[in-house]
Image (cartoon, grey):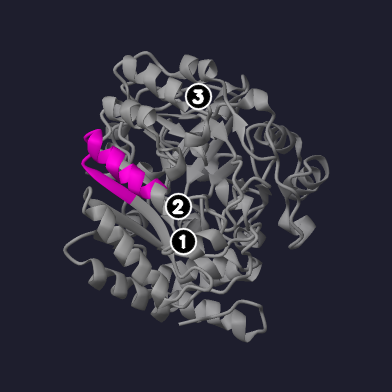
Amino acid sequence: MNERALVEQRLAAEIGTLYKDAPERIALLYPSPYHVGMSSLGFQTIYREINEEPTRAAERAFLPDDVAVQRASGRPLRSYESDRPVADFPVVAISVAYELELSGVIDVLELSGIPALAEERQPHHPFVLCGGPLTNSNPLPLAPFADAILMGEADQTIHQALSLLDNAESRQQACKALAREIPSCFVPSEHGEALPPIARADDHCLPAYGPIRTPHTELSDMFLIEAERGCSRGCRYCVMRRSTNGGMRIIAPERILERVPEDARRVGLVGAAVSDHPRIVDIVETLTARGVSVSLSSLRPDRLKPPLLAALRSGGAKILTTALDAPSQRLRDTIDRRAREPHLRAAAELAREHGFQRLKLYMMVGVPDEHDEDIDELIGFAGQLAAVIPVSLGIAPFVAKRNTPLDGQPYAGIKVVEGRLERLRKGLRGRVEVRAVSARWAWVEYALAQGGADAGRAVMQAHQAGGRFADYRRALQAIAERGRSLRVVS
């Protein structure tokens, strides 16, 4: 199936696609494939926000499923809604979730016929405006590829930025206007590496929700909507901790429920701490009474009480997912997590009692001051939980992020992380399923999370060399050798 035929198939299966004729048209790009991008509430929200403006229309484009095939075809990347070449739009907006999507940013720009580096663009090229979750921590590695970056919550600033761009007579004038008029807009050509504050959207913009449902995505046919924004907790590794944008903002149940389409059969309640919503049980029970299956993006173990589990199970949930966070209680205390072993034991018992098939726990290894004894504590505790209900561990190496108390903490090391994962697998073999993120690519994520604009240029260099881990390691090590603060650990 060729690329356009695949697009037409996906469009035919969508519910809620926004087709609109307007004088101002914006290409909205996601630097990962369709099935990932359409699971992003932020991406869908900006798509809806732009299209709600009477004079504007947004059209989507995504990283192709097979970049090599697309590149070989010579066909430029085109929008989903009108099949228009992305390079024909005056503004290209890109939503970036995290550091490893930077290679996708390069691909979507190059496949569109737009120079990836901002400095190489000519007057006829589109203005490249970036934003997304990455801006809550460190967007500096994105800077070489962006003409401007909207920091933080862009529900409102996207409108202000597009108005300024529509009135600007040149790229240079647009950059100066954005830097002058929008305090949260980072313009690399104007600001260098001095980051402005992140934006906070007014509460009347909440809840964010996605207009489109599709079966061809990670969250098949699910309607996505915020239950809250931000977080009231102080986890020391998290960019969404209580100090970010004023903590947690609760959304009234009636505002959530009135947005859920009557024909929606699956609903995803999204937020950094959804189970902390004081009326989450009421919301879930109301939806399940409609015959809706409900998923929560974040379940905290200390909030897993019988009424909530009963409501989730009645909605069809089969796997109970929560966070263990770190291998031992000592380390959980160090990173300021409230999860305690009694909470997890109770969760396992309740999951079994309510008929859940499995308990899935997300956690990190390579946490600062971690030792083999901490891994051994996890082996013992996970084994105890597995005696109650089947258990899966989803493990990611710890990556220190900017704008957190653990900013600057070194990466534990590829060999160290791999050794601890192997120790964990051996200790739990035959009892607990263990799935882990690559220690190597987590190191790349760390290097970018702690890096500046030169780390973004290293991504470009690695991408041009083939995009293998060895290419990234070589390019990022060169930064360290030039005296940057990046610590390279193998």
Quadrant of the frame with the N terminus: top left
- Give the residue pinned by disc 1: 329
Outermost residue, right direction? Answer: 180
Tell me residue 202's x, y (percent): 69, 29
Q: Amino acid at mark 3?
A: Arg
Say whether residue 216 is left or right of residue 452. Answer: left
Tell me residue 173's x, y (percent): 79, 46
Q: Amino acid at mark 1?
A: Gln
Q: Amino acid at mark 2?
A: Arg
N-terminal label among 2 and 3:
3
Q: Secondary structure at mark 2?
A: loop
Labels in figure, total = 3
Q: Are marks 2 and 1 in contact (CB under 8 Å)?
A: yes
Give the crowd class for mark 1: few <14, some 14-19, many >=20 residues within 10 Å.
some
Give the crowd class for mark 3: few <14, some 14-19, many >=20 residues within 10 Å.
some
Q: CA distance from mark 2 to mark 1?
A: 7 Å
Tell me, yes or no, whether the highlighted magenta stretch contains residue 242: no
The range drawn in magenta is 343-360
Tell me residue 70's x, y (percent): 34, 53
Q: Residue at x 22, y 48 (%)?
A: 389
Tell me residue 55's x, y (percent): 63, 22
- Give the residue pinned by disc 3: 279
Q: CA distance from mark 1 to mark 3?
A: 29 Å
Numbered circle sitting on residue 340 = 2
Q: Nearer the viewer, mark 1 or mark 3?
A: 1
N-terminal label among 2 and 1:
1
Q: Residue at x 63, y 71 (%)?
A: 454
Q: Are marks 2 and 3 in contact (CB under 8 Å)?
A: no
Q: Residue at x 67, y 52 (%)?
A: 147
User: Which residue is at the front of the view, 447 or 164?
Assistant: 447
Q: Main secondary structure of the magenta part?
A: helix
